[in-house]
Amino acid sequence: MTNPTTLSFASLSAVAADGTAVIFAEEGPKLSPAAQDLDKKTKGRLKDAVKVSGFKGKKGTSVDVLAPQGVKFARILLVGLGKLKDFANDDWINLGGVVRGKLTGREGDTAHVYLEATKSELSVEDIAAFALGAQLRGYNFDKYKSKKPAKDADAKVLKKIVIHCADSRAAGRAYRPERAILDGVNFARDLVNEPANILTPAEFASRAKALTKAGVQISVLSEAQMKRLGMGALLAVGQGSENTSHMAVMQWKGGGRKGGEPVAIVGKGVTFDTGGISLKPAGGMEDMKGDMGGAACVAGLMLALAERKAKVNAVGVIGLVENMPSGTATRPGDVVEAMSGTTIEVLNTDAEGRMVLADCLWYVQEKYKPTAVINLATLTGAVMVALGKVHAGLFSNNDDLSEQLTAAGLETGEKLWRLPLGPKYDKLIESKVADIKNTGGRWGGSISAAQFLQRFVKPDTPWAHLDIAGTAMAAESTDINRSWGSGFGVRLLDRFIQDNYERR
């Protein structure tokens, strides 16, 4: 992962005279005090540029003034805010991404951002959100590029962003937890972006172990241990691969004894999915290196919770397997037994993620008695047919939990859309030769997959399943992400935990 840009905070009066100056205007346009000051220093050139361009201060619009006389800045970038009264938390995050996207470094390696409104003082939370968005946008996965511009002495790259604001110390304090979230998102992005020949199940488990440096307690179950526990569903998926399967268990005990039982987050970690004997088409199969986006989110979330010292008890469980065709692979028609004792007829070996999650879900409930369980998985193409790449699918047995997750999605911009569960859908997975089958057929594919998972959730356990197939990998470009792997879910679940589970 590469983000060569450092970020710091300074007062509005701090002297700055290099690189790019970023200033703002609300709709009108109404220039901020810093913009008015620079207009005076340039003898009205800024207002001239506003007039000629037709700039009205609308949200997302901007005006560039290059090498203006009267100041030492090589460039002044005036950005429209629109109407600040309409801004929510994710608007500030997105604004940070928009501004970062306009900063190339060609005019100097430093950008000075004068973050202030026309009349009112911005909150430090707004400023911290802006800073998070700017740094999220700066992520670039160039690990395997043999030539990196940032290491070229003659290359012009942005190295510093200095945010000038009314209370720089308070803004810095407000940004600390956001920096932890940034690290968690970027850790998840790194994992999703890695090629499958590098990120095997064993390598993923090794990288999870590195979280011990942040205070996360890690244990990794081997194939032998999982076999003794009766995890026949998970092991059936990986038995065709030369790379052994693993389960990584990550605990963050920030709530202490008073924090009670943990909230559990479970992730599908199929490091590569060929479909097994039910082989996928060749076209697009390379994307299946990202079929561990759910596990990546769990690992990133646990890092974020640990780095910001979240006052919550949380456990993350990820099932790490590779689904390959071979002489030892599971065959369509085979019957396996999950840890819960449920027998599964495997009709399609490409419906493998639900089998991995089945044993992970049962394990975490048996061992940790969690207050709630949320699982994430790049589970079905069907959810993308229904929701595209804008929303992740949400399924739940608990209305309160569903509403809490939906609210967190709206706050962070990582949006969820609830889809139904019910007895009639459950009939789709009934098997003639086993307790259930691992696919319900063509219709309602994301729903029947969720119904399968619900068979491994105890009736008194609040549970939610997030199908992130459309949002975690091959993600659409957004204001804060230009990476193939988005890190979707880390910010969503961190907000969910902050709002509902952290000990006050």
Image (cartoon, rainbow, N blue to C red):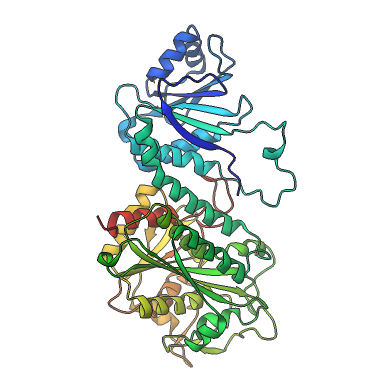
Q: How many badges with numbers are in the image?
A: 0
From the viewer's perspective, tell me whether residue 367 is left or right of residue 156: left
**Image quadrant where residue 451 sits:** bottom left
From the viewer's perspective, tell me whether residue 387 is left or right of residue 110: left
Q: Position of residue 370 (x, y in %)?
A: 32, 72
From the viewer's perspective, tell me whether residue 332 is left or right of residue 295: right
Q: Looking at this view, name the residue that lies furthest to the bottom.
A: 433
Above or below — where is 151 with respect to 12?
A: below
Instruction: Give the residue displayed 48% in from the left and 54% down from the top.
Output: 184
Q: Looking at this view, name the residue that lies furthest to the top.
A: 43
Q: Nearer the viewer, residue 85 or 381?
A: 85
**Image quadrant where residue 312 sits:** bottom left
From the viewer's perspective, tell me whether residue 274 is left or right of residue 423: right
Q: Position of residue 114 (x, y in %)?
A: 43, 25
Q: Position of residue 323 (x, y in %)?
A: 61, 75
Q: Nearer the viewer, residue 198 or 219?
A: 219
Above or below — where is 442 with respect to 194?
A: below
Above or below — where is 121 with respect to 140?
A: above
- Taking the image as drawn, is residue 464 in sight? no
What is the quadrant of the C terminus in the image? bottom left
Instruction: Give the residue displayed 32% in from the left and 57% down from the top.
Output: 311
- Taking the image as drawn, is residue 107 in sight? yes
Q: Position of residue 469 (x, y in %)?
A: 51, 62
Q: Nearer the viewer, residue 428 or 368?
A: 368
**Image quadrant where residue 165 sits:** top left
Q: Nearer the viewer, residue 11 or 96?
A: 11
Instruction: Give the residue displayed 58% in from the left and 49% down from the top.
Output: 483
